[in-house]
Image (spheres, rainbow, N blue to C red):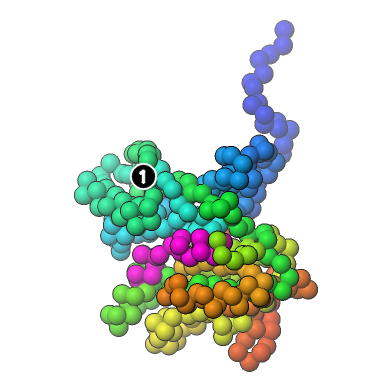
Amino acid sequence: MGGYAAPTHGRDVDKKITSKQVADVGEFGLIKLLTEGLSYDAQTIVGVGDDCAVYEVSKGHYLLATCDMLIDGVHFSRKTASPFLIGCKALACSLSDIAAMGGRPLFALISLGLPETTAEEFAQDLYVGIRSMCRDYHVSLVGGDTVRSPERVVIDVSMIGDCPKGKYVLRSGAKPGDAIVVTGYLGSSAAGLEIVSGKQSESDAERRSELIEAHLAPEPRCAHGVFLVENFEIHSMMDVSDGLAGDLGHICEQSKLGARIHADKIPISETLKAFCDSAALNPLKYALAGGEDYELLFTLAPAELERLTSRWPDMFEIPLTHIGEMDANIKGIHIISAGRRERPLDAQSYEHFRKSRERE
């Protein structure tokens, strides 16, 4: 009589078990490992691999879906940020993902893990921040979950949006010769993070406040993304959440192109420049590898760029900067210095599970 065989539930029982840790494969290697071989139904237009998933609910009507998890000690610190600002930032991450696809946010669900010793006032103020962002960006908060967390506050945001006029923009659509463009300024959030974490100091109160605000109170570019896709042919787009080097690298990889950018064209605020001058730091480090700026990074044809730059100042106050071009003849990203010297860019963006998790 044969022995009992436990069900495998689709697992490959012959698959070799390795002793690797997630730090050995890194964040993106882990994502590939977990999602390889996924299949989708005909209505799933875009699955894993972009800022949002895209689902066709009816002919020409697409929904966008994204989720973001924030953990105390990784994405924020209760020691340095108010619960109100933590709530604002939690929503900003997902709002920025919707903006990166050219979409309009509709509703959100919030799952919250709290240690049992958490003060009631903290939870209330956290939701004041969340509800404030929902109000400002016309998002309905429709549900979620609350659980006990053993040690740290955990906030998970799921957000649904749609595509006005059925348009959406992916990371994979860049074309050779496209202009590479970014909104706003880069690097200030990373400098703000170093200030609040005590890695750097800033004696000038106004500069300190502005850099910390860039980190704790980012402004998702939702209106800007909708304006871009409704009025121009944007070939590729994403938000700058992990640093310009890493995020432009995603566009290069998924579009199967290289990129050439100019160091002296990367938009850096006067505040960040002054902070770096006073501390003998390189502001490009923050712009290229810092992350959490939540600006839009996109590509389009040069002729479209001319139209865009003529209309942009009438619509928005934040700057729009042409920083380089997509190129089919190079691999990866090349950066051109102010002295016109070109070299491959080896700056690394932030990645979860990297064995050294510092923003290099």
State yes or no: residue 28 in magenta.
Answer: no
Q: Is residue 40 visible?
A: yes
Q: Which residue is mark 1?
A: 141
Q: Is residue 46 above or below residue 321?
A: above
Kindly identify the amino acid type of the residue bearing the numbered disc 1: Leu
Q: Position of residue 193 (x, y in %)?
A: 40, 69
Left or right: residue 52 compared with residue 14: left
State the quadrant of the N terminus. Answer: top right
Depth check, front residue: 15 or 41 = 41
Q: Nearer the viewer, residue 50 or 140?
A: 140
Q: Is residue 73 visible?
A: no
**Residue at point 47%, 77% (across, down):** 313
Query: From the viewer's perspective, is residue 97 above or below residue 65?
Result: below
Query: What residue appears at the point 63 percent right and 39 percent down from the top-left corner?
Result: 43
Residue 315 position (above or below residue 61): below
Q: Position of residue 22 (x, y in %)?
A: 58, 50
Which portion, as a residue range, is magenta?
A: 212-229
